[in-house]
Amino acid sequence: MIRPGERGIVRGCCAGLLLLIVLAAGGAFLADRALAAPVLGAAPAGPSHGDTEVAIAVSLGTAMGAQLLAGSHGAVVLSEQDLTVLADANNPQPAKYRDLQVRVRDGVLVASAQISVGPFNPTAVLHVSLSLLPGQKGPVIAAQVPEIDVGLLGLPGFLGSALVREIDSALSLDRLFSVDPRLNALRGDIECVAVVSGGVAVGVHDPGVPTVASSCG
């Protein structure tokens, strides 16, 4: 027979055990979600404008120069393959962020990379939007990361703040305009950037010509 004083002890033990079971089940669920493979779809698609950042910059500069000779505005599209090459070239920590790839999904860029969390190697996925921000040398193409996932587990923004800063640097595209002299000359005349089907459109205009944001499509 359980005495009145013992009854409280039994209840406390049962409540503690129940809490441990709930926490263990919750931890297992979160771990399972984090280690699950995200559905990213097909590999980054082309066309490819080069295998290196320099090659892409030269191709981009050539195309934009030809368009501006024919008119006052020009726009090119960097494909998923191009964006993957650029992100890899600007990867701040290649040993930490492996197999970096960039795709377009539902109107935003989706950057994925294999990371290390203890003995595990889940896939981090960042949903990236692009915009033009004022800069010292003219508009700057900047990246924002509104959503971060590890596997199938969404993370609060503050947990991935360092990763956001590094991906912002890798995907800003600002460095690309400093690689080729023709692009560098157009750096102050970027008029638009937009995530489009299959890639990112970047538009420029002749100096002194009004900006037409719709030239990116």
Image (cartoon, helix red, strand yellow):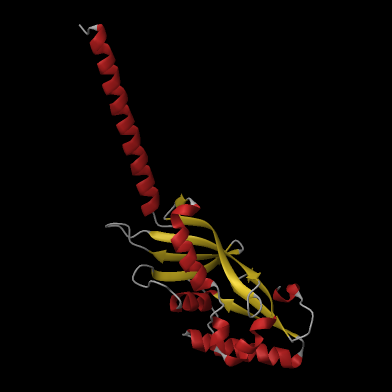
What residue lies at 69% left-to-right and 82% top-to-bottom? 189
Image quadrant where residue 89 sits: bottom left
Q: Is residue 217 above or below residue 187?
A: above
What residue lies at 73% left-to-right and 93% top-to-bottom? 69
Q: Is residue 176 left or right of residue 1?
A: right
Image quadrant where residue 128 sits: bottom right
Which quadrant: the N terminus? top left
Q: Position of residue 60 (x, y in %)?
A: 60, 86
Q: Position of residue 123 (x, y in %)?
A: 40, 60
What residue lies at 28% left-to-right and 14% top-to-bottom? 8
Q: Position of residue 164 (x, y in %)?
A: 48, 62
Q: Is residue 107 above or below residue 78?
A: above
Q: Position of residue 121 (x, y in %)?
A: 33, 60
What residue lies at 32% left-to-right and 27% top-to-bottom? 18
Instruction: Using the image as rendered, state which of residue 173 and residue 120 is in the foreground.
Output: 173
Which quadrant: the C terminus? bottom right
Image quadrant where residue 29 sits: top left
Instruction: Using the image as rendered, state which of residue 113 and residue 133 is in the foreground.
Output: 133
Q: Is residue 4 left or right of residue 175?
A: left
Residue reaching furthest to the front: 136
Q: How many marks?
A: 0
Q: Is residue 18 above or below residue 144?
A: above
Q: Is residue 41 visible?
A: no
Q: Is residue 103 above or below residue 148?
A: below
Q: Is residue 23 visible?
A: yes
